[in-house]
Image: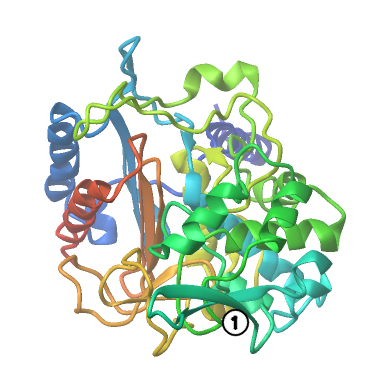
Amino acid sequence: MRFTKKMMCATIFFILVASIASGQGIPQATNPEEVGLSKERLARIGQALTRQIDERSFPGAVALVARKGRLAYFEAIGQLDPKTGTPMAKDAIFRLYSMTKPLTSVAMMMLVEEGRLRLADPVGVYLPQLAKLKVAAPSTDSSGRFTYSLVATESPVTLYELMRHTSGIVYAGFTRTEYIKALYTKGNVGWASVTPAEQVDALSKVPLVRQPGTMWEYGLSTDVVGRVIESVTGTPLSRFLDERIFRPLRMTDTTFLVPADKVRRIAQSLATDRATGQPITLHDITVPSKNDAGGAGAAGTAMDYMRFLQMLANWGEFDGQRLLSRTIVRHMTSDHLGDIKAAIPTLAPGYGFGLGFAVRRADGLNAAPGSAGEYNWGGAGGTMFWVDPKEQLVAILMTQAQPGVWQREFKELFRQLVYQAIVD
């Protein structure tokens, strides 16, 4: 039978449809060696993650590694749900927690590109309640007792300070300033169980931990970025992200609310924390939240997030869709801290911070391997990613685990095993 031009077109169309249906859209390397990775060395990742599962760090994981724009490793390991024994699946849906922040940060920079705002703008331009925030200034009274007084900001909190986490807005659970922690707790300053209006109102009533631009401290800044996006666009953050990022990149499972027909695909944690024996409670992504938390509220699959990261690795373009210019991606993934110090050890040694990502400053200065210019972040529920432009490498690890600093153990293990697999 002669293979006609019409038949060739039909075949190409079928392959394209199959690719879209798979949700992948990232070319698969026939052999990892084609992109300079060793198949035998990559196999060590699964072996190490299995040991972590046996040690009850988490019940299961999905790991992806892409290099030079091609997928070289994609494995599901362990269990999706330890209660039922359901095996982990490649299309498992994970709570992203702080891996929501890069999504919100990209959305903000899209508005910057459109000229709808400037990063130098004070946040009060868009959220008037936050126009006259005070700063908690430490001092001692006449008897030598340590106390705080409220003083005016020396400069306003700008969108730029929010993007790089130098705003003075913190997380109650992270800050080491007990005075601020107590005020946040008393005022219900957070992201869960509050409406957007309630969140902004609560933030307006507590002081900043320090003067804007003077120190890096992780916190609710990206949630405020989400509130700014809503103010500028007149659209809920989840809808804006869906229309401008998720749909164009075909991130079909990324959402702030998992629909009923996908609930069975949600990855679950172990019942108790391995270190403390206490019950593990994670964010419920099956019920509507009161607000779209730009710093913590999204959920999605490893492949969805790989598509987002490959867009960044491609300097703003993926699968025929350009979301950002090359210059803006470079700006976002450059260090914006310089000599500014970190108030808490959330940033790893050798890393600064850009506009939504931690950024590695040098090839060394950290026990874990990596290259200068690599950028990354993770989520409290056990997720992580990084993009290494020098090595043309993108890597993602998705698990569901008890939030805590102990997660660095398996996250750093994954990182070193990815880098040792590079052979060319």
Q: Can residue 163 be seen in this view?
A: yes
Residue 234 position in % (x across, y down)? 87, 55
Hey, which quadrant is residue 200 in on the image?
bottom right
Front residue (pair 322, 388): 388
Residue 289 position in % (x across, y down)? 67, 34
Q: In this view, does 424 lie to the left or right of 316?
A: left
| Quadrant the C terminus occupies | bottom left
Identify the residue position indicated by label 1 in the image: 327
Of all residues, the one furthest to the right in this rendering is: 234
**Looking at the picture, does residue 327 appear above or below residue 283?**
below
Q: Is residue 373 left or right of residue 111?
A: left
Q: In this view, does 72 lie to the left or right of 107?
A: left
Q: Is residue 252 left or right of residue 233?
A: left
Mark 1 burial class by Cα count in 10 Å: few <14, some 14-19, many 20+ = few
Residue 307 position in % (x across, y down)? 52, 51
Tell me which colouring the rendered structure shows: rainbow
**Looking at the picture, does residue 249 appear above or below residue 87?**
below
Identify which residue is drawn at 54% across, 28% down: 284
| Quadrant the N terminus occupies | top right
Residue 327 position in % (x across, y down)? 59, 82
Identify which residue is drawn at 60% across, 71% down: 162
Q: What residue type is labelled 1?
A: Thr
Identify which residue is drawn at 27% across, 82% down: 362
Front residue (pair 168, 259): 168
